[in-house]
């Protein structure tokens, strides 16, 4: 990430979250980076004041928390002038936030990464000199990834959605076999090696979609269409001073699926589904209900919804961590 000797990190993410633990505590200790701590990640006004006072250059944050900071600094963008690199993770960074950051912090590089606790926790991150908004960058050195069809486990071409296989020393031992998984060791092995040896700007980037395939699971589990349906609504109604304005959740019930939009704005069901239709969602990819709320609850990590944990791909000794992603060239 091209850290410099004089860099200062503003650490405010909760240490009980793997992103906060590794980024705000382990990174400064291991890398010798100076750090300024702040106890409350929801205290946007206090964070802006601390940035203005201590002039940190590095910020590791979630999109939700960063949107709070930008909103609090809207009338005084000079308070954020010291920021040089901002890395977001833990949830997808919406396009509206990239535009907002460019407006208020034009000199800061906004990068998006992806990771989970079971991968220690970073899988990939956008390099500051090779960024493309809407992607989560390139895998870390020593981490191999491959997007495959969830049923056949065959590699997919660029632009297709599938499962992301992650292999490397950073994957927790109980989740990764000692030898390279079969899908990584056969058809695409040479391609992966070539990607790793080529110049960073030529390396493939990953497009995040959702953590599990977009199906309708059984037994009252969360409906996996929810994160896909939420994205265009969140773009139309981005987070404000009081937090997110929309959240989509769904489950499969004995009588069928049920996908509900929870929102703090006055939005009718027909209007919400019309927005989804404009974004290209058709057929079953629609909302069943809209619930008006005064405020949407947040997790301590800044996420506005609970997400399914990663699942294991069945396959005996060749099981690896699998997530739903799409590759890009």
Image: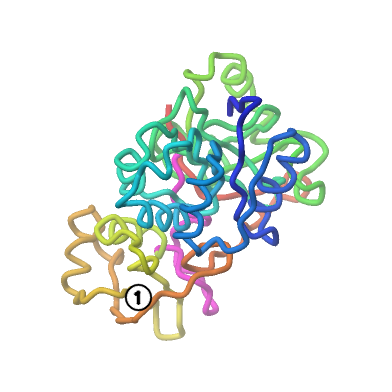
Q: Is residue 32 above or below residue 196?
A: below
Q: Quadrant of residue 292?
A: bottom left
Reply yes or no: does residue 35 show up in magenta: no
Q: Quadrant of the N terminus?
A: top right
- The residue pinned by badge 1 equals 262
Q: How many marks?
A: 1
Who's the residue at 52% across and 79% down the image? 220
Residue 152 in view here: no
Q: Residue furthest bottom?
A: 255
How far from the left and from the top, in percent, is residue 291?
31, 81
- Identify the main secondary structure in magenta: loop
Q: Nearer the viewer, residue 184 or 199?
A: 199
Q: Is residue 123 left or right of residue 272?
A: right
Residue at the location (61% across, 41% down)? 9
Q: Residue at x 47, y 36 (%)?
A: 82
- Provide the residue span drawn in magenta: 206-225
In the rendered view, how is the structure colored?
A: rainbow
Secondary structure of the residue carrying numbered label 1? strand
Left or right placement of residue 315 versus residue 267 in this view: right
Q: Give the side of residue 178 with respect to residue 221, left or right.
A: right
Give the side of residue 50 with respect to residue 94, left or right: right
* Quadrant location of the C terminus in the rendered image: top left
Q: Residues within 10 Å of mark 1 (few under 14, many from 20)?
A: many
Q: Looking at the image, which residue is at 70% across and 62% down?
A: 16
Q: Is residue 208 magenta?
A: yes
Percent x, y of residue 176: 76, 45
Q: Quadrant of residue 152?
A: top right
Asked whether 244 or 200 is in front, the reply is 244
Instruction: From the top left corner, tell me how far across and down residue 314 is, in percent.
Output: 68, 54
């Amino acid at each position: 990430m091209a850290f410099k000797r004089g860099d200062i990190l503003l650490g405010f993410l909760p240490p009980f979250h793997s992103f906060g633990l590794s980024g705000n505590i382990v990174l400064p200790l291991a890398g010798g980076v100076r750090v300024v701590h702040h106890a409350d990640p929801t205290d946007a006004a206090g964070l802006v004041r601390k940035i203005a006072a201590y002039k940190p250059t590095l910020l590791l944050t979630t999109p939700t928390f960063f949107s709070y900071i930008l909103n609090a600094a809207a009338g005084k963008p000079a308070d954020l002038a010291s920021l040089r690199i901002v890395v977001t993770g833990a949830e997808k960074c919406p396009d509206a936030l990239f535009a907002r950051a460019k407006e208020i912090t034009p000199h800061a590089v906004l990068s998006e990464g992806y990771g989970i606790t079971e991968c220690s926790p970073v899988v990939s991150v956008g390099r500051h000199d090779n960024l493309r908004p809407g992607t989560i960058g390139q895998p870390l050195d020593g981490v191999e990834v491959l997007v495959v069809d969830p049923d056949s486990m065959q590699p997919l071409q660029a632009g297709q959605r599938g499962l992301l296989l992650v292999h490397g020393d950073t994957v927790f031992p109980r989740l990764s076999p000692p030898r390279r998984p079969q899908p990584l060791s056969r058809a695409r092995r040479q391609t992966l090696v070539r990607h790793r040896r080529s110049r960073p700007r030529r390396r493939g980037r990953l497009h995040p979609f959702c953590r599990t395939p977009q199906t309708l699971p059984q037994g009252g589990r969360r409906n996996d269409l929810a994160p896909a349906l939420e994205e265009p609504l969140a773009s139309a109604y981005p987070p404000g001073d009081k937090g997110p304005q929309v959240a989509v959740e769904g489950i499969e019930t004995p009588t069928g699926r049920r996908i509900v939009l929870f929102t703090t704005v006055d939005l009718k069901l027909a209007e919400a589904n019309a927005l989804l239709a404009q974004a290209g969602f058709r057929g079953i990819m629609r909302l069943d209900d809209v619930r008006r709320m005064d405020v949407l609850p947040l997790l301590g990590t800044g996420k506005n919804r609970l997400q399914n944990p990663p699942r294991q791909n069945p396959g005996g000794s060749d099981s690896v961590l699998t997530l739903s992603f799409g590759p890009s060239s």
